[in-house]
Image (spheres, helix red, strand yellow):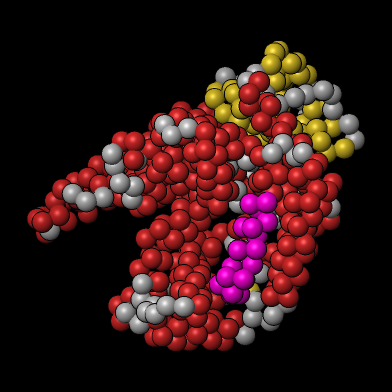
Amino acid sequence: MVRKSCYIGFSYFAGLFLCTIGWGRNNAVFALASACVAITAFALFKRYRKHIALCFVSFLIAVGVNTAYTHIFYDKLTALDGKTVTVKGEITDISYIGSDTCRLSVNGTVGGVKGRLTFYADDIEYDYYDNIVATVKVSRIKDSINFKSEQYDRPKGVFLQGSTAENIEVTGSGNTILRSIMHYRDKMFMLINDIIGGDEGGFAAAMLCGDKTELSKQTKLTVYRSGIGHIFSVSGTHVVIISAMIGWLMQKLSKDKRVIFAVQTVAMWAFAVFAGFSVSVVRAAVMLTLVTAAPLLYRRPDPANTLCLCAVVILTLSPYAAADSSFLLSFTATFVIGTVCPKAAALVKGKGILYSLERQAVNAVTILLCTMPVQLMFFSEISLVAPLSNILLVPVCTLALGLTVITAVTGGAAIIAYPVLTVVKYLLKVVLFLAELFSKFSFAYLPRGVRPLGLVMLVTCLVPVAVMFLRKSVKLGAFCTALMLVCWTAVYN
């Protein structure tokens, strides 16, 4: 059976996604419905009985994992709503917010239950991965008129928020290696902003560290409306650059593939810590680890199989992440890039620069349309100039990111940092200028909240891709895309 990991991964994800968006209330219904579907399919499609059985078992396991996680963690943590509890654990993040107050994120136990909590404390000398014991009043995170906090935080495994700690005690130091990595991240963040400065510095620091605090609200809005906001998600591009640089260096020092693999893997996961263990960077690190390990295990890496294995690993550790916007966008885009785009680009016949640009355009539009359902679920605006801006601006951003990584890898030495980051500054000036220009077009973005625009976009977004593959014609796909955009604009107006 080819691509067993795909069947397992997609079925496992489907089970967790349905259970998570149903908030665990309909798990028994999902299990019973899946059994009915599996029995019917088993009887009708004798040729695919192995596939059906594998998918059903994976789906059922996912329902069980979600049920267990909800009972063991979610229910027990939310039962602490309004209580004053003891929090024990390691400080994973520190934010100084002024007025002699800081915000601490702690991973450990909350009221004796394993979990994560963010609360406020007096601004004294705390450090990353300090072990602390604090007494904090906690409350359940709830949606408000301004922001759907619960829907945002729950998929990330955060269910409670804390007030200012009544008392707090540092009981010891934690992992010194992880602490050193976090200190180095802060050093690079400040160095980049000091040398480059302005929105360009904030842009470069956000690309490397995933921290957008130094970017103005207007600049962030401009970048997202121009369709390149994904460059701030520390993900595959970053990990590939790190892995390639370390791999190239190690090949100069050693011919032992196992040594090269070990050093590359350590570097990738150190960068994952550096980037705050975001879903996208963990996915990229797991995926690239499996890809680089494949030759040592005499296996041929397959993008779809590897991606689905990543999904199983990540969702087992954090089941509610199946409904997280970062997870869904990251995995959807990676799946499309690895499996759909090569087939779409193969429909473009010919050689030369024009055909290369046409293939890039086909890939960019395919990615936009295939990720559209996920964007419609979570975002209030959809960028329509994303294909153009991704073709023109993402290569420049990738070059700037590569130069920024060189600065970080070389320790921020002044002799390298100043000339390299000066180049980065002017590259990003061009990016921000063009992003602002693109975002000013009247057709640059559409607010999907305008009814019935969201429904029309959801129903029609995959039609051009389907037509292109069924008819094997890029021109027909382009015509359908143009027709679809006209339809969206008409409904919006």
Q: Is residue 48 magenta?
A: no
Depth check: give the residue in front, 229 or 237: 237
User: Residue 179 location, x and y as percent?
Assistant: 68, 26
320 versus 344 height, above or below: above
Q: Residue at x 42, y 61 (%)?
A: 336
Outermost residue toward the right in this view: 99
The span shown in magenta is: 384-403
User: Residue 438 location, x and y as percent?
Assistant: 69, 75
Q: Is residue 394 magenta?
A: yes
Which corner quadrant of the image does residue 415 belong to?
top right
431 versus 128 height, above or below: below
Depth check: give the residue in front, 467 or 475: 475
106 versus 215 height, above or below: above
Depth check: give the residue in front, 308 or 192: 192
Q: Residue at x 68, y 51 (%)?
A: 403
Q: Residue at x 54, y 76 (%)?
A: 453
